[in-house]
């Protein structure tokens, strides 16, 4: 896909049907396992990639069917190819002071691994810079090994987790980088 063939713009309500219909699942052969060891005066956290015995299909932590009802709650950008919305990112400046918090990055299955997620993340960071924010934080399901690899490749560093974050009961991993 030539780079001139797409545009990133603010999401509008007419994008929502197409964005909700995108395949939000991810197939993976790996998960990121979080090991927590506590001793008096010390807490060790180890995060390691573990191969699964078989490929799993991971559901997105936020149901796509809810997108039309929640899209207006935080900023959202869409990737457009012509008049068709093919990917999106949702983020907020309200969660952590001085940071743009990226909650969702979804790219249609046929367009994955072409750099669109990276471009969306850069666009969200540019949005944050315009507002004087200094850091980008992205949340990723621990079972979404492709997303973890991508954010690490983009220079994000592991900065925390929450095992009670998603209704799917998956562990949320948090990665950050300065912008």
Image (spheres, grey):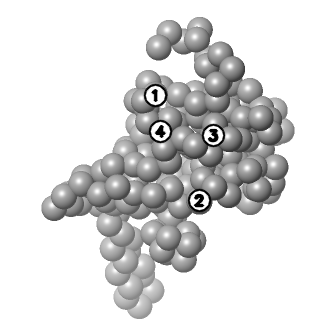
Q: Would you say the residues marked 2 and 4 are in contact, meaning their CB atoms lie under 8 Å apart?
A: no
Spatial distance from mark 2 to mark 1, Cα to Cα? 20 Å
Q: How many marks?
A: 4
The residue at the point 60 percent across, 49 percent down is 104
Q: Is residue 97 left or right of residue 61?
A: right
Spatial distance from mark 2 to mark 4, Cα to Cα? 28 Å
The residue at the point 56 percent across, 72 percent down is 167
The residue singled out by tag 4 in the image is 155
Spatial distance from mark 1 to mark 4, Cα to Cα? 22 Å
Q: Would you say the residues marked 4 and 3 are in contact, meaning their CB atoms lie under 8 Å apart?
A: no
The residue singled out by tag 3 in the image is 19
Res 33 → quadrant? bottom left
Spatial distance from mark 1 to mark 3, Cα to Cα? 13 Å
The residue singled out by tag 2 in the image is 63
SS for dot 2: loop
Q: Would you say the residues marked 1 and 4 are in contact, meaning their CB atoms lie under 8 Å apart?
A: no
SS for dot 3: helix
Percent x, y for residue 162? 53, 71
Spatial distance from mark 4 to mark 3, Cα to Cα? 27 Å
Image disc number at residue 111: 1
């Amino acid at each position: 896909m030539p780079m001139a063939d797409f545009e990133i713009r603010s999401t509008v309500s007419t994008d929502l049907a197409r964005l909700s219909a995108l395949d939000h699942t991810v197939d993976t052969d790996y998960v990121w396992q979080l090991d927590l060891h506590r001793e008096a005066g010390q807490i060790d956290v180890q995060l390691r990639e573990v191969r699964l015995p078989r490929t799993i299909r991971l559901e997105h932590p936020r149901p796509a069917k809810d997108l039309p009802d929640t899209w207006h709650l935080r900023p959202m950008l869409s990737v457009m190819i012509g008049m068709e919305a093919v990917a999106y990112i949702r983020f907020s400046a309200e969660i952590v002071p001085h940071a743009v918090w990226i909650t969702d990055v979804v790219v249609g299955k046929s367009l994955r691994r072409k750099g669109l997620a990276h471009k969306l993340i850069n666009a969200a960071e540019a949005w944050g810079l315009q507002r004087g924010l200094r850091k980008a934080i992205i949340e990723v399901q621990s079972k979404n090994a492709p997303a973890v690899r991508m954010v690490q490749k983009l220079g994000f560093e592991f900065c925390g987790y929450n095992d009670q974050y998603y209704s799917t009961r998956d562990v949320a991993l948090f990665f950050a980088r300065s912008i």
